[in-house]
Image (cartoon, rainbow, N blue to C red):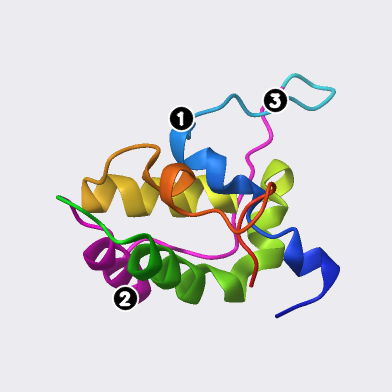
């Protein structure tokens, strides 16, 4: 479905269980460098689709993970570069917090191979 780089996509699925607030690195002057994601996931309509597809009591892996892929695959390069921009953390925070979903839901349900989802 995509290049090898895209096939490695979503090794960040495990981030759905990790807290978003990791410490930002400091520059040489001791100032904190903020990692800014160029995508504003807050309020995006696709987030609601993922949330509605992944609600309890028994979310279907096919439906939930399909909605996650549909929403996230266009941002795969940014999401895979989470160390530099924090996009994966921001996206999962928005989905889980806004949807009041169970932390770890995506790492439990959504995995195409050992490293995550494929687009």
Contact between labelled residues 3 and 1, with CB atoms less than 8 Å apart: no
Contact between labelled residues 1 and 2, with CB atoms less than 8 Å apart: no
Residue at 25% x, 52% y: name it: 98
Residue 83 coordinates in the image, percent (x, y): 71, 41
**Foreground label between 1 and 3:** 1
Tell me the number on the disc at residue 45: 2
Magenta: predominant secondary structure element?
loop
The answer to whether 29 is drawn above or below residue 83 in the figure is above
Quadrant in which the N terminus is drawn: bottom right
Residue at 75% x, 68% y: name it: 6
Residue 77 coordinates in the image, percent (x, y): 71, 65
Dot placed on the residue nearer the N-terminal end, 3 or 2: 3
Q: Is residue 114 found inside the magenta-colored segment of the image? A: no
Dot placed on the residue nearer the N-terminal end, 1 or 3: 1
| Foreground of the two, 60 or 104 | 60
Quadrant in which the C terminus is drawn: bottom right
Residue at 65% x, 66% y: name it: 118
The answer to whether 15 is drawn above or below residue 42 in the figure is above
**Start-end of magenta stretch:** 31-56
Q: In which quarter of the image is residue 24?
A: top right
Query: Circle 3 — which element?
Result: loop
Residue denoted by label 3: 31
Residue denoted by label 1: 19
Question: Image check: 74 left or right of 58?
Answer: right
Q: Is residue 44 found inside the magenta-colored segment of the image? A: yes
Contact between labelled residues 2 and 3, with CB atoms less than 8 Å apart: no
Farthest-out residue, left = 57
The answer to whether 42 is drawn above or below residue 94 in the figure is below
Query: Circle 1 — which element?
Result: loop
């Amino acid at each position: 479905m995509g290049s090898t780089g895209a096939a490695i996509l979503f090794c960040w699925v495990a981030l759905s269980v990790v807290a978003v607030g990791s410490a930002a690195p400091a520059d040489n002057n001791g100032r904190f460098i903020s990692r800014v994601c160029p995508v504003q996931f807050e309020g995006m309509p696709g987030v609601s689709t993922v949330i509605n597809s992944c609600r309890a009591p028994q979310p279907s892996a096919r439906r939930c993970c399909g909605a996650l892929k549909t929403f996230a695959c266009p941002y795969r390069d940014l999401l895979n570069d989470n160390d530099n921009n924090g996009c994966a953390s921001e996206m999962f925070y928005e989905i889980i917090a806004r949807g009041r979903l169970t932390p770890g839901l995506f790492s439990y349900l959504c995995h195409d191979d050992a490293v995550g989802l494929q687009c």
